[in-house]
Image (spheres, rainbow, N blue to C red):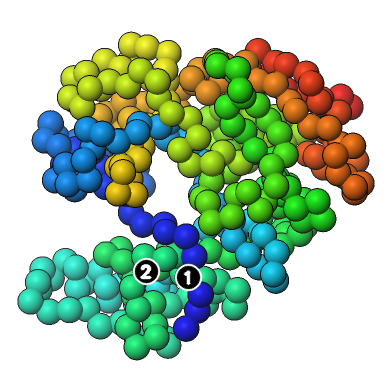
Amino acid sequence: MRRRGAVQRKVPCLFVTEVKEEPSAKRQRQPFKVLATETLNEKALEADIYNAIPTEKVDGTCCYVTTYKGRPYLWARLDRRPNKQAEKRFKQFLYSLEDCKEFIWNFEEDFKPVPDTWIPAKEVEFSNGNPLPDENGHMPGWVPVEKNSKQYCWHSSVVNYEAEIALVLKHHADPGLLEISPVPLAELLEQTLELIGTNINANPYGLGSRKQPVHLLVPHGAFEIKNPPTLNQNDILSWFEGCNEGKVEGIVWHCRDGCLIKLHRHHLGLCWPLAETYLNSQPVVVSFNRNDYDCDFGPKSLFHHFSNLDGQRFDRLKDIKFDG
């Protein structure tokens, strides 16, 4: 049996949602919207949502830090998906509404191949030693990001395995100030993070440029919302639209039992990305003393560039520029 990775389950929405078709959007890839009702999700109530910690939902791609070859490594998200024939058969089963029957997967033939290093997420269930797909027919999982990986080059740019560090964006000790600094991968073990930057999700935070891409890791739950709205749809709408702190992709509530509950702006019919985001409205300082590391950072690497900015402060993330 394969080893198991971090939990990467589907996070329930704060409100009960409903699917609404958009007949006028025939050319869209997804001619419908998933919109929130005003009813709180039962799963949120069971998880004691009223005592949960609200955090900013950061727009990037999910990563995971765990061991590989006996050392801490960054892993990229990779879902194992069914091939075309199996997916067609699965969709036909879903549309047939035969609730009394269970769909039978052929594990040897139905799924696209994944690297031998792939591991399933922790909450993936197993049957006879085989991982079971979720309700969408996918198996969430992870693959290690090798040094100088072409497929995961943006992931690779934020880690240095020789020094065993990662470039992380987090809160500085001073309130209202962000910090970019190297963090030992060992301190991030068994954590999930979000990779953001120039070439991720159309770069909603305006990081870097095509000539000088900038990517960073953000630990999940790193940015707690200090003045959250009450758990009422109208109040949340007003918060998203009426205050600077609400200029975020969404909210993720971290519940005491470990459960996560989310709400995306799209669930309320609001637009994302925005021209200006809350993450970009805060000043940021770079803290990176290269003398702390007994290795040479390549002249084109992010580690080299950020170490040259040690101690410098910028009004916004998008203001960070490298010389040359």
Which element carries disc 2, helix, strand or loop? loop
Instruction: Indicate the quadrant where residue 261 lies.
Output: top left
Q: Residue at x 17, y 79 (%)?
A: 102
Looking at this view, is 60 or 168 the one in front? Answer: 168
Q: Does residue 305 appear anywhere in the picture?
A: yes
Q: Earlier in the sequence, mark 2 or mark 1?
A: 1
Residue occupied by mark 2? 124
Judge whether 125 appears above or below 290 on screen.
below
Along the horizontal axis of the image, is 155 left or right of 192? right
**Amino acid on which the number 2 mark rests in the picture:** Val
Instruction: Indicate the quadrant where residue 28 lies.
Output: top left
Number of numbered labels in the structure image = 2
Residue occupied by mark 1? 4
Along the horizontal axis of the image, is 163 left or right of 7? right
Judge whether 223 appears above or below 165 on screen.
above
The Cα atoms of the two marked residues, 2 and 1, are separated by 8 Å
Q: Residue at x 42, y 13 (%)?
A: 244
Q: Are marks 2 and 1 in contact (CB under 8 Å)?
A: yes
Residue 108: image x %, image y %?
Answer: 42, 88
